[in-house]
Amino acid sequence: MTPKPVVLPKLPTDLDQNRLPQHVAVIMDGNGRWAKQRGLPRIMGHQRGVDALKGLLRCCDDWGIPALTAYAFSTENWGRPLEEVEFLMTLFERVLRRELQEMMAENVQIRFVGNLSSLPPSLQTEISRSMADTCHNTGIQFTIATNYGGRQEIVQACQAIARRVQQGQLQPEQIDESLLEQHLYTQGLVHPDLLIRTSGEMRISNFLLWQLAYAEIYVTPTLWPDFDRTAFHQALLAYQQRERRFGKI
Ligand code: FPP
């Protein structure tokens, strides 16, 4: 049997299929401002933010980008008003429960990264279920950073490695970049080639500090709920114009 040709529906003709990022990371900023501009409560911005994220996931899948990671909740976001934090936790849980079947049907592999053990137990249950149910899927790798902090991720990796040294399983000289990577939450995922941040802020905000070392950064003034296919197309065009040197000349 001849293998089926790879079909990439609707990839805009001005994008080079062979130079697409293999992993896109996104800081979904501007939900609050989007709501405020419309006289709505901030939580409505988060609600609309879910639709934007679903749209981007589908677009990556359609255009042949095999991995997407979204920053949903940082370790610093606990400092927000309690009602907003509670709303977000309930929203994550509700979305997971509602979307899991469709994600399964679309062959999405879901992974959550972050300090998941401090999340509400009912959310942890949905997270575990979504990861277990989709772990053998072979489609797009969709990673959601929740209660995630880049520094915290590196610290927990160091602690895990130190324990192995203490137990005599490892010599300090054996610690190298590849070993540290194996102890990161993102173990097994290729590093993002492109980081997109919406709403104009030019910061990394403790997101994937290790993994973004050589990512191209694209910042757009568009607020996250408005980030659609057209905005993503612009980001990819900008990405394809960059010359990636990885420290060389
Ligand atoms: C930042 O905007 C956005 C967040 C902290 C929450 C992002 C979460 C979602 C879009 C929901 C994703 C859902 C799932 C299931 C993964 P902001 O509130 O800081 O906006 P502002 O800077 O305008 O105030």
Image (tube, helix red, strand yellow):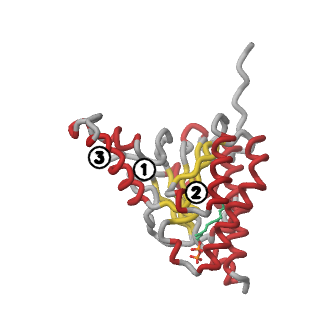
The mark total stands at 3
> Could you tell me which residue is drawn at 67 percent across and 70 percent down?
46
Three-letter code, disc 2: Ala
Q: Is residue 226 visible?
A: no
Q: Could you classify mark 1 by the number of other residues whose Cα lies within 10 Å: few (under 14), some (14-19), or many (20 or more)?
A: some
| Residue at image mark 2 | 70
Residue, x 73% and y 83% (percent of image)?
Answer: 40
Which structural element holds mark 1? Answer: loop
For the residues bearing labels 3 and 1, Cβ distance under 8 angstroms: no
At 54% across and 54% down in the image, what residue appears? 25
- Residue 110 left/right relative to 80: right
Q: Give me the C-alpha separation between circle 2 and circle 1.
A: 13 Å
Compare residues 86 and 120 and report the one nearer the observer: 120
Task: Give the farthest residue toward the bottom.
Answer: 39
Q: Quadrant of the C terminus?
A: top left
Quarter holding ligand 1: bottom right
Relative to 11, is 214 on the left or the right?
left
Mark 1 sits near ligand 1, with its Cβ under 8 Å away: no
Is disc 2's CB within 8 Å of ligand 1?
A: yes
In this view, the mark in front (3 or 2): 3
Q: What residue sits right under mark 3 in the picture?
A: 162
Whether tag 2 and tag 1 are in contact, CB under 8 A, the answer is no
| Disc with the residue nearer the chain's start (3 vs 1) | 3
47 lies above or below 239: below
Disc 1 target residue: 211
